[in-house]
Each structure stands twice: as structure tokens, then as C-alpha cells.
Image: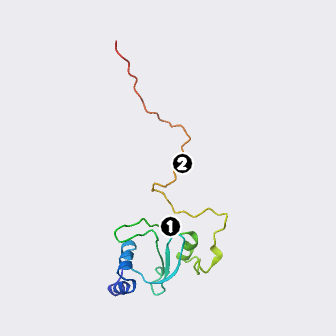
Amino acid sequence: MSSLPRTIKGFLNLGPARFMRQLNNMGDTKVGTLVGTDKFGNKYFENFNESYGRTRWVEFGKQDSFFTRAEANASQVPAEWHGWLHRMLDAPPTTDKSMVTPKWAVEFTENLTGSPKAYKSYNTTRSKFHAWTPKVAHRA
């Protein structure tokens, strides 16, 4: 939860539109320097004046506006940015190229569980239960 002076400062620095977007999507307002963006449109920020554990954050690219809330979750962050967000790496991937994805690696995708694009396996086993269909005998 933000204090009133911090919230007012955030409103003045961010502007009304970005202030409301952050408040709606993150539940808080934060001002920081843009460290980089990834190919999915996610923006990564850093501010050392915040309390420990809140100095690095991400604004997801799928968040649309104040009226439409997009489903943003942690599986939308690629591995190299995940390491920087959680302080496993000191330098962001824009400057530290040690976390470059090799050419042979599978392309990163977010977790699509629960969505229409979720993976559904094909069942090759026979069912143990079969629906009963009554046989009707005609009376003479």
C-alpha cells in the first residue's frame, strides 16, 4: 500500500493515464528508470529508492487500458529477464549477454493453461467405462 505523498508524487511523475493503468494492473504506482523491453512488449523498470524487494518490476505488454484488464502472469516473462527481476543476475540482459538464448533452443512461450490455446493431449487408451444403450424389443 502506498502512502499519500508517494501516490501524489507518482501521479505527478507518471501522468493521469499511466498512473491509472498502473493502479489498475499492479495495485500500486511506481516511478523508475526503464531498463529494457523484451520482444513481447514487457517493460522492465528499476528504482533503488524503493524498499528492498520492490526495486525491480515489470509492466506487462498485454495490459491494455483501465477498462479492460488483460491476464498478466509471471509465465509471460522470459528466462533472462526472470533472472534479473529476482536478483539472480546483477546486470539486465540488455547489457549482459551471458543469458542469450541459443539458436537451437525452443522459442519461449507463456503458459497457456486454462486458455483456448492450451495443449490437449490425444488419448490413446481405451475407456474403462462404456455408456449403456438399452436395446428395445418390439412387441408383437
**In the foreground, 35 or 91:** 35
Residue 67 on image: x %, y %: 34, 69
Horizontal and vertical percent position of residue 134: 39, 26
Q: Secondary structure at mark 2?
A: loop
- The C terminus lies in quadrant: top left
Instruction: Give the tally of numbered discs.
Output: 2
Judge whether 58 appears above or below 135 on screen.
below
Quadrant in which residue 101 is drawn: bottom right
> Is disc 2 surrounded by few (<14), some (14 to 19) or many (20+) residues within 10 Å?
few
- Number of the label disc, if any, that sits on residue 59: none
Q: How is the image coloured?
A: rainbow
Q: Quadrant of the N terminus?
A: bottom left
> In the displayed structure, does residue 89 sit left or right of residue 115?
right
Q: Residues within 10 Å of mark 1 (few under 14, many from 20)?
A: some
Looking at the rendered structure, the kind of residue marked 1 is Gln
- What residue is shown at x 55% (from left), y 40% (from top)? 125
Rendered location of residue 52, percent (x, y)? 47, 82
Q: Secondary structure at mark 1?
A: helix
Considering every residue shown, the one lying at the far left of the view is: 4
x and y percentages locating residue 115 in the rendered image: 45, 56
Q: Mark 1 highlights which residue?
A: 76
Circles 2 and 1 in contact, beta carbons < 8 Å: no
Nearer to me, 88 or 40: 40
Q: How far, Cα to Cα, is label 2 from label 1?
A: 23 Å
Q: Amino acid at mark 2?
A: Ser
Q: Earlier in the sequence, mark 2 or mark 1?
A: 1
User: In the image, 66: left or right of 124?
Assistant: left
Q: Which residue is mark 2?
A: 121
- In the image, farthest residue toward the top: 140
* Quarter where residue 20 is shown: bottom left
Q: Quadrant of residue 103?
A: bottom right
